[in-house]
Each structure stands twice: as structure tokens, then as C-alpha cells.
Image (cartoon, rainbow, N blue to C red):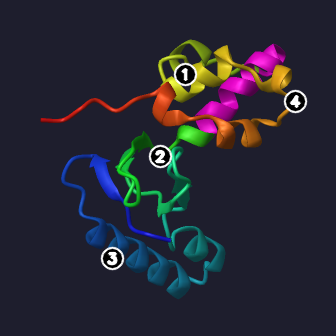
Amino acid sequence: MKDPIVIDPPGMDVAAAWKECHAYSDRMHAAGRPIAAAAGADPGICSCPACREMHWQWGKRQRCTKCGYEYPTDAWPRYSEGVHAAIRPQFRSRDHERLMEHPYYRYGFEHPVEATGLDAYDAFQAIDWKAVFPMEEKP
């Protein structure tokens, strides 16, 4: 697991965030709350949609340390929600209209996987995200 390059929020200090996690976990252990201590011990994980490199889930947007692709840390869950909102409209979130603003949710909603024969996770892994959401060239 790697520390990411955090794009959003700008200037995020990952080392300081790790210190906060450790302090919280220590406080919860001292308070006799081992489940809370474990839950706050790390930020969770996410992976680059383009190359699958695994990173700690710091921030809202990251740049992959392996391939340089930039992505939102919630790309997979939002894509999955979009697919399931399309397949099972009766379970669609009340926030569906707002969620349609998220590019991975919208893509999942507009490209449900039923026709592919894949489940949502396998479909997400098979998509060429660099082609779907090309990065803007930076000067």
C-alpha cells in the first residue's frame, strides 16, 4: 500500500493525517473502545482506475504514484452505485440527480453492465478509464 499524491484538498499533509489517525486510535484504545480504535487507525484504501495501483484513501482526488492518472478516491463506489441505480431503479438514491454530477456514477448509470455479462466490479476493472476520462494536458 502506498501513500498517494493528493490533489484535492490542495496541500494536504499526508504525514500529519497519519499522526491524527494514530492519535485517535491511541485515544480510543485508552478509552476501552477497540472497535473505534481499529476503525480510525487508517483512512481505508482505493485504487487507481487506470492501472489498479493501491493507495491509502487520503483526500478526495489523487494522482497515481505508478501511472500518473488522476482520479477521485470514490471512483469505484460511485461507479457501482450508478450501475445499480440503472439496473434496479426501485433502489435508486434520493440523491440520484446530485450523484449524476459525479463522472463515475454517471458513466455507470449510462453504461449498465447487464449487456456485458460482467458484474459491476469486473466491468469497472475492464474499462479503459484513461480513454473514458482522459486527463487534461498540463503545461
- At a point 37% along the width and 60% down the height, the residue shown is 65
Query: Which mark is on residue 19?
Result: 3
Closer to us: mark 3 or mark 2?
2
* Secondary structure at numbered mark 4: loop
Identify residue for label 4.
117
Label 3 sits on a secondary structure element that is helix
Magenta-colored stretch includes residue 84: yes
The circle drawn on residue 73 is: 2
Which mark is nearer the camera, 2 or 4?
A: 4
Q: Residue at x 28, y 47 (%)?
A: 7
Relative to residue 120, is residue 55 depicted above or below? below
**Which residue is identified by label 1?**
99
Q: Earlier in the sequence, mark 3 or mark 2?
A: 3
Q: How far from the left and from the top, in percent, is residue 87?
A: 81, 19
Q: CA distance from mark 4 to mark 1?
A: 25 Å
Dot 1 alpha-carbon crowd within 10 angstroms: few under 14, some 14 to 19, many 20 or more? some
The reply to whether callout 2 and callout 4 are in contact (CB within 8 Å) is no
Q: Is residue 53 left or right of residue 134?
A: right
